[in-house]
Amino acid sequence: SLFTNHNVWHRQEVLSSMIGRMSDSEEGYDAAHWNSSSQSHPPWLRFHLGISRWQLYDHKDPNLRQLEEQLAFSRIVSAVQKTGGTQLKLLMSFPNYGQALFKPMKQERNEETNHNLYYFSDFERHNAEIAAYHLDRILGFRRIPPVVGRLIDMVKEIKDITTDRKLARTFFTSPVGNTCFYGQCSYYCSTEHAVCGRPHVLEASLAVMLPDLSLAPRRSWRSPWRRSYSRSKLAQWENNAKYCESVKKSPPYSQGTRLVDLIDMAILDFLMSNMDRHHYETFEKFGNNTFLLHLDNGRAFGRHSKDEPSILAPLVQCCRIRRSTLLKLQLLALPQYRLSDVMRASLSRDPLTSIAPLLSEQHLTALDRRLVTVLKKLRRCQEQYNDSVIYNDIPGHLNFGL
């Protein structure tokens, strides 16, 4: 695991380091009395200690539901603005010292992204963060930290408890009596783009925070298929159909699973129409031989009426896929396990579904349509390269083709 290596002494050291940053005298926080027994740990800490080389959490992790409930219902004792990034986000803290990343509702769920808006100018959507977590789990990746939807009282759970004076100064009451704030960030942090409640209740996504960087450093990698983020220039991969040949010769893509990991991420992004994947992260402790974190998915699910084929460039240009990923995609294409149905059922567990579906039926239908496209691309790859398309991560599995 990320911390323990099954060593009780080392786990105690990690706990001591975490608790050392916490003061039991802090108002609103519970006294921390944790020991090396995982039964005494709050859900967020069990999540941190369970991170392994290949995934953030186990397929049958019994702690996952408790963690989701903490995010959705635990009392918020602190709310401050999170620095960095281009759009508004807050850091929420709970009585047991757990923390979550807050992203507010900025537009209606069924509102499509404007056709004339560039991908790097799009709003981040709270429901996209929630849906991305569910899709990532359905695909068997488990590389997105748990995210849930929540109704936030902007006065009691942000304005009245924040110690962030810069954030507090951005609160105001709209002409129709709604509580609003806009914070400080690179884009969309102004009175013209304020986040407003109804009249003071706001929908938001809350994602559990990963371990502190001082305890679990992460490395940021620039994606080889990063877009140019220019209105006029194309990236190198957009002009060179054989671009993957040079990527495959370059570390860390020249060995191990990094290339098929990146293709997993491209498939995830294509299914949810996320064009904004410029970087990805890994935990430094595991070196190059580990999974990729699928973070920051707020620009996904913007348009259901159009598919963006360029997102699949890593798959199309490299013609490579994990066998386990392929089998999962084939399963989700079957009528009895249709991706849209599985996704709808999974999202129904989220608290915000009681207000309205987190994804419209058009977005769910788009998932099925895009899955068909992925499998068609793979069949073309196999027609050209035969069995070399499949990276066999399931030893002993017979090849029955695509």
Image (cartoon, rainbow, N blue to C red):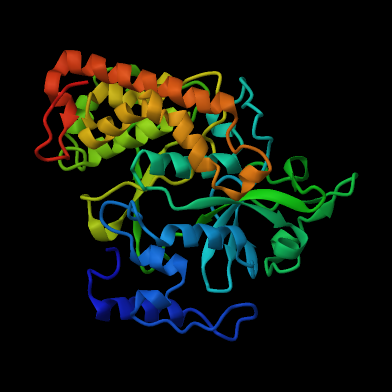
The answer to which image quadrant residue 11 occupies is bottom left
Furthest-front residue in this view: 336
Residue 344 is at least partly visible in this image: yes
**In the image, is residue 395 above or below residue 337?**
below
Q: Residue at x 22, y 18 (%)?
A: 381
| One can see residue 118 in this view | no
Would you say 166 lies left or right of 133 here? right
Asked which quadrant contains residue 152, the reply is: bottom right
312 vs 244, left or right, is right
Residue 279, percent across and down? 39, 42
Q: How many marks?
A: 0
Farthest left residue?
Answer: 396
**Rendering coords of residue 267 (x, y %):** 36, 30
Using the image, determine if residue 23 lies above or below residue 232.
below
* Residue 94, position as x, y percentages in the image: 58, 69
Residue 111: image x %, image y %?
A: 66, 29
Q: Nearer the viewer, residue 280 or 329?
A: 329
Q: Nearer the viewer, residue 166 or 66?
A: 66
Q: Quadrant of the C terminus?
A: top left
Q: Residue at x 30, y 68 (%)?
A: 3
Image-quadrant location for residue 2: bottom left
The quarter of the picture where the N terminus appears is bottom left
- Identity of the residue drawn at 69% across and 67% down: 162
* In the image: residue 165, left or right of residue 26: right
